[in-house]
Image (cartoon, coloured by chain):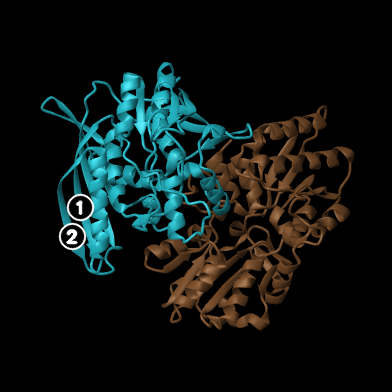
Amino acid sequence: MKYQDEFRDRHVVLGLAARIREHVTGRTEPMTFMEVCGTHTMSIYQYGLRTLLPPQVRLISGPGCPVCVTPNEYLDRAVALCRLPGVIVATFGDMVRVPGSTSSLQEERARGADIRIVYSPLDAVAIAARNPERRVVFLGVGFETTAPAIGGSILAAKRQGLANYFVLAAHKTMPKPMGVLSADPDLKIDGYICPAHVSTITGPDIYRFLAEEFHIPCVITGFEPADVMQGVEMLVRQVVAGESRVETQYSRVVRPEGNRKAQEVIREVFTPCDAPWRGIGVIPGSGLRIADAYAAFDAEKAISVAVEETREHAGCLCGEILKGKVTPADCPLFGGACTPESPVGACMVSSEGTCAAAYKYGQ
Amino acid sequence: MNKDLILLGHGSGGKLSHQLLDDLIIPTLSGIPLAGQNDAAVVEHGGQRLAFTTDSYVVDPIFFPGGDIGCLAVNGTVNDLAMMGARPLFISAGLIVEEGFSRTELTEILASMRGAADAAGVRIVTGDTKVVPKGKADRIFINTSGIGAVEHDFTINGANARAGDVVIINGTIGDHGIAVMARREGLDLQAAIQSDCAALNSLVAEIIAAGGEAVHVLRDPTRGGVATTLKEIALQSDKTITLREDALPVNGAVKGVCSILGLDPLYVANEGKLLAVVAPEAAEGVLARIKGHPLGKDAAIIGHVAEGGARVQMETAVGGMRAVEMLAGEQLPRIC
């Protein structure tokens, strides 16, 4: 396939692996790079990239999976909404299996709730248009990459005059949690593999404070295996040279100014807010709520429902895993009480979750 | 988690399906051990070895590019018999029809069943029809059972993979699942993807003629895809199977759809593909015969078998190594 196979070329990837080994030859001190995008997590596992890296180069996963960082409380509200008569919950597929405090959307579906898996929020708008007597709630999770499309769905619903389309918004934005992790004395991160598509929207400047204040090298990296290996190679070079800059490996897509149109949609429909991250806690200004002008589309404001008291799962280390402090194998539940078929924590559910990737692809 | 609920994933053909079979259905009904869990049962009666199988078809939509629920119901059961090396002979047809279904569409489905049976050389000899109230079934469900004759005196089953064997597939993977899903989701694809729905019994006859008892395992990777089927073989045979990702034949359009939707073709269903695990000395001969068959022109050797482990691993396209597990949960429900 054009523009895909080229970036999965074995010789290119193995050549980059050899260059990385050359750079670190003679170094004993390990360097730890964190990726903060679930698609990178998947790519690294799916292509077995860790097996191509020298022992001095360690890759860890951060809070990059939108499903994983969404707290139980949100799931509980979604479950409560889907139990209301006449409500259709539309969602990207991964959310269906995520366990809330006592139930999940997949269990509610088995009990008769109307849960629809869609590939685009505009499909949810179409469902609302076809079912004027029903209320359609779209579960809006994700980072800067999904926020414009979901914002666009609200604008589309408004244009169409739909009064039965709602979004339950739990959007997160990227650079702030990286600052929190960078300031964490227990973590020693030597470089960030910065998200590809988030950066397509935002442009590279959002990471500058990490390089300048925390002196951590940042490389915006594409998702294909050759991209990831080149991103790692660029990080290794910065570390070896004692530099910390923001570089863009994924230059075929990421522009310095980002995607202005998508940024405008986000500014129009959403307002920055404090947001709770599973495992990290509330980070000021790290989320997006629906702006007051669009409150009629905000499921949280427009549909009142009693939500059960939130319970966390005992023993689940998702929070520590999302901070990169422990690996899936360190969790006592991993592979035993917590499997993709019967997940305890969100990291095991999402196809982009670190635990799901570690379980599915092993090493 | 509520353990009493049957979830869609229990019907995925993947890990949850296996758990339901192993924990509940098999112990309650028969107690057949893992090694005996194959696409069809092989039973002996009056000195004759017979293969016997059954399958239900609930695909949505009932008409899809490259086939429909009718030919799928015949070919699927023919293939389950053929995977035991049996010559399929007789098929039953059980129809569950929703009130209000169209007679025109029923006619088309029946003609498709008849056409598939004629093409595969099997006869539909018995059947049953039920109509249920509107909303109690989704248009039409079909169950078929089949009987075939096992005419060789060696064993072909999932527990028979041996160290050194090679793994052959007869063509591109994932076509059926993606064709059905693209139609169901209304994906507007520039390149039409056709289901590979086909009867494999004539191909199996060629494989056995070429390889004889060097043919150790035959299995059709339907729900759960090639990954799940190979993991089943690895578990049943207690061997390690190593795949080479760059050897896996994948249609370019299927690869594209999978990339966009985040699916892995290794887990997507096929309805006209078989995996043959064959002794190394017979591999080239069997591969050549498969390639000479109309259903095998894209055939390839995709992996090999080694001692121990009961696991599947893959050398990735870029040279890394990773484990391959069964499908977890549901990937695409109701694709057959």
Residue that extends furthest to the left in the rendered view of this protein: B46
Q: Name the residue under label 1.
A: B94
A360 left or right, relative to B141:
right
Label 1, secondary structure: give it: strand
A256 left or right, relative to B324:
right
Q: In which quarter of the image is residue A156?
A: bottom right
> How far is mark 2 from mark 1, CA to CA?
8 Å
Quarter holding the N terminus of chain A is top right
The answer as to whether the residues below labels 2 and 1 share one chain is yes
Q: Nearer the viewer, residue A354 or B12?
A: B12
Quarter holding the C terminus of chain A is top right
| Numbered circles on residues, count | 2
Q: Decide: marks 2, 1 in contact (CB < 8 A)? A: yes
- Image hue for chain B: cyan
Depicted A142 relative to depicted B252: above or below: below
- Image hue for chain A: brown
Residue at image position (46%, 56%) is B182
- Residue B109 x/y as whole percent: 26, 55
Residue at image position (57%, 45%) is A357
Q: Which of B10 and A120 is in front in this view?
A: A120
Is residue B137 among what the camera can see?
yes
Question: Which amino acid lies under the numbered mark 2 shown in the image of this protein?
Answer: Lys
Question: Which amino acid lies under the numbered mark 1 shown in the image of this protein?
Answer: Gly
Q: How crowded is mark 1: few (under 14 residues within 10 Å), some or many (20 or more)?
A: some
Is residue A321 among what the camera can see?
no
Q: Mark 2 points at which residue?
A: B130
B11 left or right, relative to A295:
left
Label 2, secondary structure: give it: strand
Specify the subunit that label 2 lies on: B
Specify the subunit that label 1 lies on: B
